[in-house]
Image (spheres, rainbow, N blue to C red):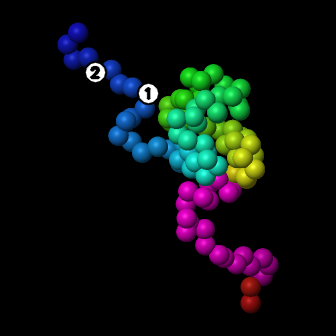
Amino acid sequence: MAGAAPPTSDVNESAPPSLAVTCVRALMERHGLPKYRQSAWLADAMGLSYSQAHRRMTGASPWTLEDLAKVAELFGETLADVLAATQPGAAVPGTMNVGPTA
């Protein structure tokens, strides 16, 4: 078939992993779970098939905030802890003034 586009995969191999994937991988590595076991662990912990878990860990399937929070909780961390750990220096101290200003 002339002019047909070549087949593409679900995941762009040259694209960097999503923030969700980066955060979950960093969380698992902090807790000593090697990369080769992460998809299998996620499948067991979340009640997913290995294929579903692997697609999440590669970025082919999206993460929900609820699922990210559940994985964080399984490791004894909060969603905020997980997100902040991959963004060092992203948080800055601040002051919020409430009410009328003079």
Vertical side of 33 occupied by 79: above or below: below
To which residue does mark 1 refer? 10
Q: Can you tell which quarter of the image residue 8 is in?
A: top left
For the residue marked with disc 2, what is the amino acid? Ala
For disc 2, the neighbor class at 10 Å (few under 14, some 14 to 19, many from 20) is few
Q: Amino acid at mark 1?
A: Asp
Q: Which numbered disc, 1 or 2, marks the residue that appears first in the sequence? A: 2
The CA span between labels 1 and 2 is 15 Å
Which residue position is annotated with label 2? 5
Give x and y (percent) for residue 64.
Answer: 65, 38
Tag of residue 75: none
User: Is 87 a magenta residue?
Assistant: yes
Position of the N terminus by quadrant: top left
Q: Can see residue 24?
A: no
Q: As rendered, which of 90 and 50 lies closer to the eye?
A: 50
Residue 16 pos. (x, y %): 42, 45
Crowd class of label 1 (few under 14; some 14 to 19; many from 20; radius 10 Å): few
Q: Is residue 85 above or below residue 22?
A: below
Magenta residue span: 80-100
Residue depicted at x 28% and y 21%: 6
The answer to whether residue 70 is left or right of residue 63 is right
